[in-house]
């Protein structure tokens, strides 16, 4: 069985600027490797160097809009659709596209 770890949208996969979740994902990857598996990690891009995991897919987060009217519109949309943070829906769409592009739908 193959696995894809999808990191939290606000988290990166770096040893220096990430939180505990990135460390947990890193340790899970290392355990899986010892068992002969190679999980894929989907994570947000970072300026910092990421963990040296070869099966990492970096996803560029959507930019926050600069225009105040667009920010208000997106906030209203977020409240109506139930997303917790601004632009998380757009990020989820990017994750879905990355899964299809990398042919990871069955994992």
Image (tube, rainbow, N blue to C red):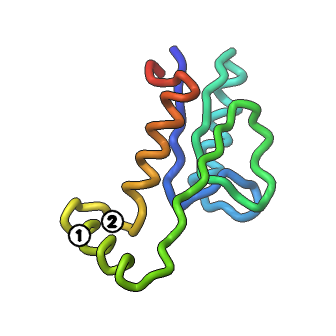
Query: Gap in Å between the C-alphas at discs 2 and 1?
Result: 8 Å
**Where residue 19 sits: x, y (%)?**
61, 61
Residue marked by disc 1: 79
SS under mark 2:
loop
Q: Is residue 66 above or below residue 30?
A: below
Task: State the residue lying farthest toward the left.
Answer: 80
**Where residue 6 sits: x, y (%)?**
51, 41
Q: Is residue 27 above or below residue 35?
A: below
Q: Is residue 105 above or below residue 24?
A: above
> Which of the pair 80/84 is nearer the observer?
80
**Where residue 97 sits: x, y (%)?**
48, 37
Residue marked by disc 2: 84
Residue visible at 58% across and 40% down in the picture: 42
**Where residue 7 sits: x, y (%)?**
53, 47
Residue 77 in which image quadrant: bottom left
Residue visible at 67% across and 51% down in the picture: 13
SS under mark 1:
helix
Residue mark closest to the camera, 2 vs 1: 1
Q: Is residue 47 above or below residue 1?
A: below
Q: Residues within 10 Å of mark 2 (few under 14, many from 20)?
A: few
Q: Residues within 10 Å of mark 1 (few under 14, many from 20)?
A: few
Residue visible at 35% across and 83% down in the picture: 69
């Amino acid at each position: 069985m193959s696995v894809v770890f999808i990191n939290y949208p606000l988290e990166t996969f770096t040893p220096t600027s990430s939180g505990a979740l990135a460390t947990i994902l890193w340790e899970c990857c290392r355990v899986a490797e010892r068992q002969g598996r190679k999980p894929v990690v989907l994570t947000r891009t970072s300026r910092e160097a990421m963990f040296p995991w070869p099966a990492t897919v970096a996803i560029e987060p959507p930019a926050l809009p600069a225009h105040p009217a667009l920010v208000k519109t997106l906030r209203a949309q977020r409240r109506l659709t139930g997303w917790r943070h601004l632009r998380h829906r757009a990020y989820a769409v990017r994750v879905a596209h990355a899964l299809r592009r990398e042919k990871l739908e069955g994992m």
